[in-house]
Image (spheres, helix red, strand yellow):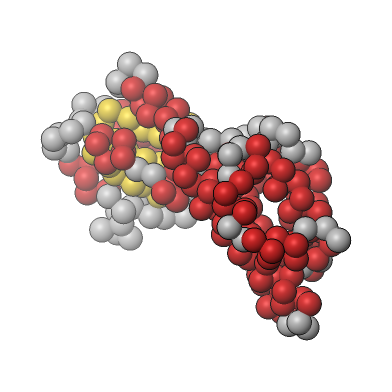
Amino acid sequence: MTAQQPIAYDAFVELAAADPAVVGLVLKGSRAHEGMTTEHSDHDLYVVLAEGATTALTRFAGHRTPELDLVVFSLDEFRGAGGFERYALAHARIVLDRLDGGIARILADKARLDAEEAFREAGGWLDAYANSLYRSVKNDRDGHALAARLDAADSIRALLELLFALDRRPRPYNKYLEWDLSRFPLPGWDTGMLLDAADRITATGDVSTQRRLFAQVEAVARRAGHGAVLDAWGEDLVLMRPR
């Protein structure tokens, strides 16, 4: 159906706004990030329906063209959406909110991890970061250059998840990392230094840079109450720390 009956963004918004079953329209992706839109940018739109409502708009579920991608949710489904979608929701732009700010409140909740969730996730990502860092440094020591670089790249993914969890925020997609950090820096971190270190480590696996960065991460993690995660690595920490 999508291929035979495409619809333009403006036309769909007009159609949806006239349908009382629609309680929210939310635009995500590059068009919700100021300065990130290009000639190739499409419109990624969530369509939120009142619980139990019936509407002919469900025929557009899964609509996907170079101009418009649609995801149709019930209100409960939208409220419960998370995982990989969480960052997109956290920075989405509201096109329509018929719930007296209810859609805005749902998005605000997506943008902020609760304290227990953040602490739990940070602990897991700290252990994953240490694991990849340790493997990278050990592989470099043993002459496995490719493995060392691959593990170094893995460590940066885990590190970014960790640092954003410590700030109780969902980690940005790679595309929006610099955009996000330029507007919302991580407390206690120099954005330029962090991005330069991530660039150097993912490109080269440089061990000295990895160790210097780990020293900063270790101090931050211990202040945040995650010392037990690090201490579980025992004497292996020596290999990760600066010489």
Residue extending furthest top?
Answer: 100
Judge by depth and name the residue closer to the eye, 198 or 232.
232
Residue situated furthest bottom in the rendering:
143
Q: Which residue is drawn at 24% across and 36% down?
A: 76
Residue 4 located left or right of residue 212 = left
x and y, in percent, of residue 193 in the image? 81, 45
For the residue pair 25 and 225, the one nearer the viewer reads as: 225
Horizontal relation, residue 210 to residue 69: left or right = right
Dividing the picture into quadrants, the one containing residue 155 is: bottom right
Residue 142: give x, y in percent of width and height.
Answer: 76, 82
- Image-based side of 66 in relation to 138, left or right: left
Using residue 14 as the reference point, say whether residue 111 is left or right of it: right
Front-lying residue, 72 or 157: 157
Give the position of the C terminus as an image quadrant: bottom right
Residue 7 visible somewhere in the drawing: no
Tally the marks: 0
Task: Name which residue lies at 41% across and 24% down.
Answer: 104
Residue 112 location (% of width, % of height):
48, 32
Residue at 83 percent of width and 58 percent of height: 242
Res. 78 in view: yes
Q: Residue at x 53, y 35 (%)?
A: 168
Q: Position of residue 100 (x, y in %)?
A: 33, 16
Residue 99, quarter of the rendered image: top left
Above/below status of 22 relative to 136: above
- Tell me the quadrant of the picture where the N terminus can be found: bottom left
Above/below status of 126 relative to 131: above
